[in-house]
Image (cartoon, rainbow, N blue to C red):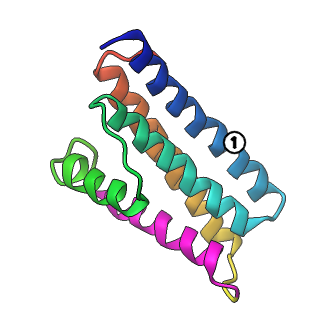
Amino acid sequence: MDKEMRELIKYRYDRAGETLEVAKELFGNGKFKDANNRSYYAAYYAMRAVYTLQGKDFKKHKTLLAEFNKEFVATEIFPRTIGRKISMLALVREQSDYNDFYIASSAESQQQVEIAEELIKLVAEYLKRQGIEL
């Protein structure tokens, strides 16, 4: 793997971590819909970092989620439980972003942040096993 690819993986992983920090700040300020959005995107950037190892990227979120579940969750490279959690992240994010009448709760938003944090940690462990220094 060349230096450019390693830098892209690190960039995407770092972006996931930075976005998670923003989600936490928003949650702490009671901005639950926005925290839900940032939690989802933190997970999204982490999954993109994983796919960078294969030289892949996806234009559509649904494709990335489906492929990640098929390739990494169904094969138990990542725990099956995280697949359901990622699906919930996406669903809550869509509701938060597009449903005018959706009311995001503190408990739900906290769960979103925790799921993103869990996935980012799992991705870090996976990348390290692949020889990527973060």
Q: In the visual, does 108 lie left or right of 106?
A: left
Q: Is residue 40 above or below residue 93?
A: above
> Could you tell me which secondary element the residue under label 1 belongs to?
helix
Give me the residue at 77% from left, 55% from top.
26
Nearest the eye: 21 or 65? 65
Main SS of the magenta segment? helix
Q: What x and y, as percent, mark residue 57?
A: 36, 42
Query: Would residue 71 be counted in the magenta stretch?
Result: no
Residue 134 position in % (x across, y down): 49, 19
Position of residue 72 in the picture relative to residue 84 (left or right): left
Residue 39: quarter of image: bottom right
In this rendering, does residue 82 appear at all? no
Q: Is residue 107 above or below residue 41?
A: below
In the image, which residues are magenta? 80-100
The residue nearer to you, when weighing 16 against 122, is 16
Figure quadrant of residue 33: bottom right
- Check residue 87 for magenta coloring: yes
Could you say where residue 5 lies in the image, as x and y percent from the top left? 39, 20
